[in-house]
Image (tube, rainbow, N blue to C red):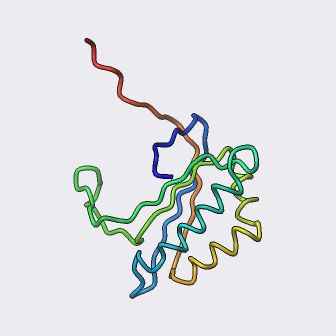
Amino acid sequence: MFGPITIPFGAKLLFNTVKLKPGVTIDDIEVAIADMCNVVKDTYGDDRGGFIAGQVFKFSGFASAEGSLGGAGNADHDLVIATYWKSFDQHERSHADKVFREKFGALAEHCSETHEFGYEMLWQGVPESAPA
């Protein structure tokens, strides 16, 4: 469940930003996130629906001045959900499914906004081994 993931070249990234309602904490939504992620993993994984892997990140408050143009800016979300799929079509079919919509609805009750954006992979790499 918390092991490393491998993303094949050509995977589609769906990047969902989540803004919680005032007063809602990550602890308040932990079960809803876990339920939703498990439904995606168990129901739409591999050949059953195109889901490859996913990750959930909480915004830490760090904004890089070195990696930003025009200042570091402010994040307008509390967490992000990154999911990797074989195709955008498979993602959309899974998210239109009643089972997913029920679990997403439980999370959405605690959110003021969510936005999901799709990205096509252009490059990936890992460090090359240092010569011996």
| Residue 89 position (above or below residue 4) | below
60, above or below 48, in the image: below
Quick check: 48 left or right of 3?
Answer: right
Give residue 79's position: percent from left, percent from top.
43, 67
Viewer-nearest residue: 41 or 104: 41
Q: Position of residue 77 (x, y in %)?
A: 42, 71
* Number of residue marks: 0
Q: Position of residue 50 (x, y in %)?
A: 70, 47
In-front residue for pair 4/112:
4
Residue placed most toward the observer, 6 or 59: 6
Q: Which residue, as the protein is rendered here, is positioned at the far left?
A: 65
**Vertical position of residue 43 compared to residue 121: above or below:** below
**What residue do we see at 28% from left, 59% from top?**
70
Please tell me which residue is depicted at 23% across the width and 56% down the height of the picture: 65
Q: Quadrant of residue 60?
A: bottom left
Task: Please report the residue visible at 60 percent of the width from the left and 79 percent of the height from the top.
Answer: 106
User: From the viewer's perspective, is 22 left or right of 123?
Assistant: left
Is 81 located above or below residue 89 in the figure?
below
Farthest front residue? 1
Identified at 46% across, 51% down, the residue is 2
Residue 84 image position (x, y, % from top left): 58, 49
Q: Which of the 4 image quadrants contains residue 127?
A: top left
Residue placed farthest to the top in the image?
132
Q: Quadrant of the C terminus?
A: top left
Residue 132 appears left or right of 84: left
